[in-house]
Image (cartoon, rainbow, N blue to C red):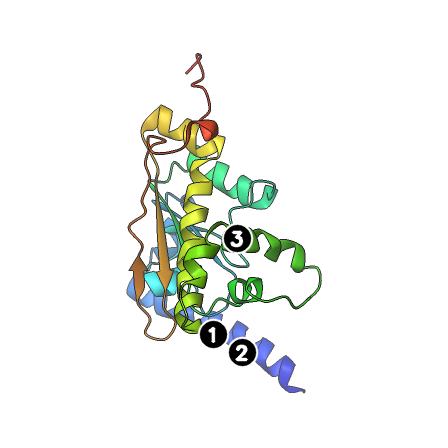
Amino acid sequence: MDNSLKSYERLLQQNKAWVEQMNSEDKFFFKKLSEAQKPEFLWIGCSDSRVPANQITGTIPGEVFVHRNIANMVVHTDMSMLSVLDYAVNVLEVKHVVVCGHYGCGGVLAAMANKQIGLIDNWIRHIKDVYRMHQDELERISDIKARQDRFIELNVIEQVYDLGKTSIIQNAWQKRGGPIVHGWVYDIGNGLIKDLKVSMNSDEDMPDVYKFEKNPLD
């Protein structure tokens, strides 16, 4: 048996151990979990394997609805992200949407360079647009690590704004006054989350060009 198969089987063994642990803590855990989900949070995070939503927030299955992609992007032509957003906001009626980036994000760092990688170059171009929008601020930062960290923060902030530009979020704000959209950055080096203080729960501060007319039937 090669090592890859052994690592594959280890996941199944760990699953059984996890089930035993959860059952020992609450014998009705899986029964309750199977009946319904009512999470308060939608998490839009990076696909990086070091940034799992539940573990770093200390939550259990059923508490966080999750969408992940490279560099935690909100791309308005991404039907996967939009479908998750629509379901979370309009069916699950989550109270909070969190965009969480992380320092050292490979996708964001690749957007600062000019090297071709492959198909992903088309995705990274959206991140490059964020750099272009904030180029003057970023290039005033001489320390490369500090510039990278600030770019990662700015990317999260722009994704929060991009969520606010969607009809899904704007319609929910009009109908029920929520959800609140937040921007966070996770530091893999110390395990802590930084709140960027960029929360939005209305289109009040949004440029008029991005605001949809209110639906007269609502």
Query: Is 118 situated above or below 43?
Result: below
Q: CA distance from mark 3 to mark 1?
A: 45 Å
What residue is drawn where x is 69% and y is 66%?
116
| Residue corresponding to mark 1 | 14
Looking at the rendered structure, the kind of residue marked 2 is: Arg
Quadrant (top left/top right/bottom left/bottom right) for the N terminus: bottom right
**Side (left or right) of 129 relative to 33:** right
Quarter-of-image position of residue 112: bottom right
Q: Residue furthest top?
A: 216
Quadrant (top left/top right/bottom left/bottom right) for the C terminus: top left
- Of pointers 3 and 1, the one earlier in the residue sequence: 1
What residue is drawn where x is 41% and y is 63%?
140
Q: Position of residue 103 (x, y in %)?
A: 41, 67
Query: Is 148 situated above or below 131?
Result: below
Q: Residue furthest right?
A: 118
**Element assignment for label 2:** helix
Query: Mark 3–mark 2 contact, CB under 8 Å?
Result: no
| Residue corresponding to mark 2 | 10
Query: Is 215 situated above or below 179?
Result: above
Q: CA distance from mark 2 to mark 1?
A: 6 Å
Which is more foreground, mark 3 or mark 1? 3
**Side (left or right) of 3 relative to 156:** right
Q: Which mark is residue 132?
A: 3
Looking at the rendered structure, the kind of residue marked 1 is: Gln
Q: Position of residue 206 (x, y in %)?
A: 38, 33
Instruction: Classify mark 1: residues with Cα within 10 Å, few (<14), some (14-19) or many (20+).
Output: few
Instruction: Classify mark 3: residues with Cα within 10 Å, few (<14), some (14-19) or many (20+).
Output: few
Query: Mark 2–mark 1 contact, CB under 8 Å?
Result: yes
